[in-house]
Image (spheres, rainbow, N blue to C red):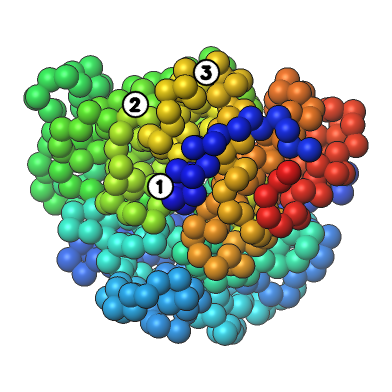
Amino acid sequence: MKQYLIIILACILPFAAWSQSNYWQQEVNSTISARLDEVKKQITGFESIEYINNSPDTLNQIYIHIWPNAYRDQNTALARQLKEQTTSEENITINLKGWIDDLDFKQDGEKIKTVRQPNIDILLLKLNSPLLPGMKTVLSTPFTVQLPPYFSRSGYTKDQIIACQWYPKPAVYDKKGWHQFPYLDQGEFYGEFGSFDVTLDLPQEYVVGATGMLQNQEELDRYRIIGDSNFKHLNSPVILPYPSLQGRKQLQFKADSVHDFAWFAGKNIVIEHDTAVINNRTIDLFVFKRNKQDKSWSRAIEFGKGAIHYYSDRIGPYPYPVIQIVEGPSNYSSGGMEYPMITLITSPESTIPFLDGVITHEVGHNWFYGVLATNERTHPWMDEGLNSYFQFWYEANKYRYNSYIGSLLPTNITDLQLDDFLDRIYGALNRLVAKQAIETSSENFSNKDAYGTVIYVKTAVWCYLLEKSLGKSVLDRAFKAYFERWKFKHPYPDDFKAIVEEVSGKNVDELFKLLKKRGNFR
């Protein structure tokens, strides 16, 4: 991508010349007990799923995602996608060593018929009795997950467990029907809102961060005390370590109004802790990082707190009790990955502006993905692109920097006032090669560069066009109204468009038609 920017920046130009009434959603409440075998890198568990049918339809079947099977062999949708996008089949062969087994689904205690699908990470449950509108049922199963060596989003390293998309998960059923789709590396997720009550059994020596609030008061107090000490003495070479304890522990996490649950466990982890106050609510902020000296990561708490305040002010108050930032293994294909209340940062580049931008972007996904839970597979721009628009403003305001351009900007650009700087930045970004339309489903991009340029950058450019057309104050009000109207729901593009028209009082048909425009904007 940067090869284009070098050319563009040589002649960087201004941007200015660019001639719910019947809504319903299902509710899924999950209770999971899981045990980590740290030697085999396996998770054995039992899950109970309360499925509430709020739709007007009678359901005779429910699709279940069993996404760890994406790592099983060379024939999965994940493997096929990776083969199409890389020349190194050897790496795929090495890493595709994960699965989920030992499933035995029951409905309200009675064994249920299951039907395997063409994609082995999707399972169809044939209900024993129809699930009528307004009724609920309980699905349950044991399961065993073999974690693969870490790549994509889940797995293990020498001393770190990265458990993402690890449990059986009902597919979304909404007004457009079932959304059962396979796990892909390039292409994210769509989940039903509900609650999680998860108990993890694992060795005492692991520090654990997870979606939700830790219920073990002694462990939570330990994290806070250690984390407060380390944060207050950031410039000291003495780090207060997590104690070396023997045996195993059972940690319980609870989360409400979320649609996913991820957890991370590591050894030799440095904990930092602070709090942020949002609308008179105190939010716990934890950083779990590697035990090393790193100037950029020493400011991770600062970056996380700045992101929480920034998005709360610009869009709507952060609604959860905790936010956690986890330093993961370096991953050159992704700077980070978001989950409710927790994010994994895997960026190998650690300059201060870049790390701040990555943390801000991933924390920002608590709004665009976490609370505004769009279908990321079909409309990826609604989370990645809208979030990038806010990230780019944050970076520009704080550093006169843009993470997609990096350090290539000359001083005559970085010395500009904010509005002029953004105008030049978006003028440059609009000249990137972006052949496909923004409104393209994620699996229909041929590679990650094309996906990133269109979904992240081109969408942010489109948002800037909205801003220039409607005025920044109007667009800000529209985003706040969008958040307030659609929080903890599943909005579609038409829902966002309706809010923009309502707030602006203008017909925005022509602006939204640009979402389907191939190539660059003019």
- Residue position for label 1: 336
- Residue position for label 2: 301
Foreground residue among 217 and 387:
387
Residue sitting at x 30%, y 42%:
349
Residue 57 percent coordinates (x, y): 82, 65
Report how far apart the C-alphas of labels 3 and 1 lie in the structure.
Answer: 30 Å
From the viewer's perspective, is 394 left or right of 376?
Answer: left
Q: Is residue 9 visible?
A: yes
Residue 191 to residue 322: above or below:
below
Q: Secondary structure at mark 2?
A: helix
Q: Residues within 10 Å of mark 2 (few under 14, many from 20)?
A: many
Foreground residue among 456 and 19:
19
Q: Earlier in the sequence, mark 2 or mark 3?
A: 2
- Residue position for label 3: 416
Q: Earlier in the sequence, mark 3 or mark 1?
A: 1
Q: Secondary structure at mark 3?
A: loop
Of circles 2 and 1, which is in front?
1
Report how far apart the C-alphas of labels 2 and 1 lie in the structure.
Answer: 16 Å
The amino acid type of the residue labelled 2 equals Ile
